[in-house]
Every structure is written in structure tokens, then in C-alpha cells.
């Protein structure tokens, strides 16, 4: 947890413009059914290993399938045997889905201003579908998931679960309209690297305007399948879709 906490603090610096106050969360999946996620209300800028809450992936996924209300979801999140314990982030369900269904190692959720601005301008589809430079493909795969706004918590988790089980969620970048973004990778540093690449591309698209020229789809496919780029992706500890 120490490395994840250190990475989260680095992500939360004001200069990075990724989160403000208690925005965002990070989780670390383990080999068994457990994962650790930041407690609700935690400031990433001050995150310590003791601020993580351990939860069960299968319990949360079952809750996503069965819960019909926020009250039901709260009962899943709160340990009935320890009501006074810190409560995991309400978005623990989304992290559970990405870990259980996509094999994510570390999930980092942030609210970057450039990404939010591009989606607010109606250009989220460009950021999700287009690839601007070769390293955009290497870091983020051939395309990203773009979701319309869903209420953070149970509603968002339900939509994520439906999407991945329909085979449409295989990406290491999820763009959440009116909300933020999620990046997952094999390590905390890699998840932050992916996040920063998405932010860089959002700034590029903003600067270039609506006439921005993306890489041809044939080049995107070629880059994604090149042996040397697959080797680099492995070294960078990515699990790009």
C-alpha cells in the first residue's frame, strides 16, 4: 500500500490538476478475493497506507447485481460486524468490476480538468476513439471506454458491469462524462502514467481544435500489434486494452 499511497499523493499535487480536496480514489487488487481501496472522504494528497479499507470483490460484485437502492448499497459497503470502521469509497463497486472482470491490478480514478473540459465541449468521443501519437496507442490501447453520466456509486457500477459482460469494456481507460476518468494497470505508477497520457492528449485536442488530425486506423492497429511496442508495454507494466 505504501507505493500506491505515494503515487496517489504525487497525482494529487495542485500542479497536476487531477483532483481537488477529496476527489478521486485508488485501489490495489490482491491475488485472492480481496482488494484495498481508499476510505470515503480521503484526500489523495494526504493518503497514507492506513487510509485503505480492505473489501471483498465477490461481495461487491454480488451487491451490484442484487442492490436496488443506495441504502442497499450502503449495507454492502459497510461491514456489519464493524459499523465504526472507515467506509470504503462509494465507487468501490467500479473498482471491483474492473478487478474481477478485467484483471486490473491498480485502479486510479481522477477528475482531470482538461479531460472534463473536452467532454463538456462534446468532444469525449474524439478522446475515446482517436489516437493522436504512437505512445497514445502504447499507453492506452486502440480505444477507450466512454460512458454517459451515471450517478457515482451503485448506478455507475451497474452500468460498468453490464458493459464489461457485454464485451464492450475492454480498455484500460474509462472516460466518465461529467465525472472524470479511470485508468488501470499492473502498478500504481503505470496507472498514473496512463492517466497523464490521457490528460496530455486532452490538452493536445483542445489546442489543435476540431481540425485535429488523428493517426489513421491502419497505423493504430499496426502500432498495437508491433512486437517492439508490446515489449515496451510489458516493461511499463501496462495492461492496455
Image (tube, rainbow, N blue to C red):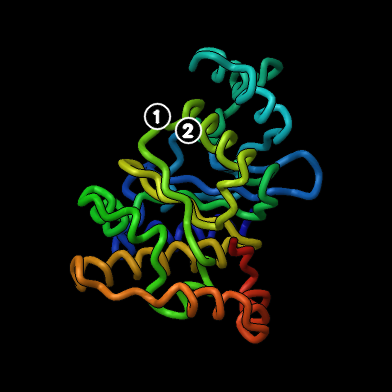
Q: Is residue 9 above or below residue 234?
A: above
Residue 148 x %, y %: 37, 39
Do we see residue 96 in this rendering?
A: no
Measured as percent of width and height from the top left, residue 12 is found at 39, 56
> Sequence order check: which comes first, mark 1 or mark 2?
1
Residue in the image at 66% along x and 30% along y? 61
Which numbered disc covers residue 156?
A: 2
Indicate the secondary structure of the residue bearing disc 2.
helix
Q: Which residue is mark 1?
A: 151
Q: Are marks 1 and 2 in contact (CB under 8 Å)?
A: yes
Q: Nearer the viewer, residue 161 or 5?
A: 161
Residue toward you, 172 or 13 = 172
Q: Where in the figure is residue 201, as x and y percent of width and height?
A: 34, 69
> Looking at this rendering, what residue extends furthest in the bottom direction?
228
Q: Quadrant of residue 3?
A: bottom right
Q: Quadrant for the C terminus, please.
A: bottom right
Judge from the rendering whether residue 221 lies leftward or rightward of residue 215; answer left or right.
right
> CA–CA distance between discs 1 and 2?
6 Å
Q: Quadrant of residue 33?
A: top right
- Which numbered disc covers residue 138? none
- Relative height, residue 117 to residue 165 (above, below): below
Crowding near pointer 1: few (<14 within 10 Å), some, many (20+)? few
Farthest right residue in view: 32
Can you give x and y, in whole percent of width and height, for residue 106 in the image? 61, 54
Q: Residue at x 69, y 48 (%)?
A: 29
- Dot 1 falls on a residue whose secondary structure is loop
Residue 221 visible, this orientation: yes
Amino acid at each position: 500500500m505504501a507505493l500506491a499511497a505515494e503515487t496517489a499523493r504525487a497525482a494529487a499535487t495542485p500542479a497536476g490538476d487531477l483532483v481537488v480536496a477529496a476527489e478521486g480514489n485508488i485501489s490495489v487488487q490482491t491475488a485472492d478475493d480481496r482488494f484495498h481501496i481508499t476510505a470515503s472522504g480521503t484526500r489523495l494528497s494526504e493518503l497514507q497506507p492506513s487510509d485503505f479499507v480492505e473489501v471483498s470483490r465477490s461481495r461487491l460484485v454480488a451487491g451490484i447485481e442484487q442492490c436496488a437502492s443506495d441504502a442497499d448499497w450502503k449495507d454492502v459497503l459497510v461491514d456489519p460486524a464493524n459499523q465504526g470502521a472507515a467506509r470504503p469509497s462509494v465507487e468501490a463497486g467500479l473498482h471491483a468490476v474492473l478487478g474481477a472482470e478485467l484483471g486490473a491490478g491498480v485502479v486510479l480514478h481522477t477528475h482531470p480538468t482538461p479531460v472534463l473540459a473536452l467532454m463538456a465541449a462534446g468532444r469525449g468521443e474524439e478522446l475515446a476513439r482517436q489516437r493522436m501519437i504512437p505512445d497514445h496507442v502504447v499507453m492506452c490501447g486502440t480505444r477507450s471506454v466512454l460512458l454517459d453520466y451515471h450517478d457515482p456509486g451503485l448506478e455507475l457500477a451497474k452500468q460498468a458491469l453490464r458493459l464489461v459482460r457485454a464485451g464492450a469494456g475492454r480498455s484500460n481507460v474509462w472516460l466518465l462524462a461529467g465525472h472524470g476518468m479511470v485508468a488501470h494497470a499492473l502498478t500504481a505508477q503505470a496507472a498514473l502514467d496512463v492517466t497523464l497520457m490521457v490528460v496530455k492528449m486532452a490538452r493536445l485536442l483542445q489546442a489543435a481544435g476540431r481540425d485535429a488530425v488523428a493517426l489513421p486506423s491502419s497505423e493504430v492497429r499496426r502500432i498495437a500489434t508491433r512486437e517492439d511496442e508490446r515489449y515496451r508495454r510489458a516493461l511499463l507494466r501496462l495492461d492496455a486494452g
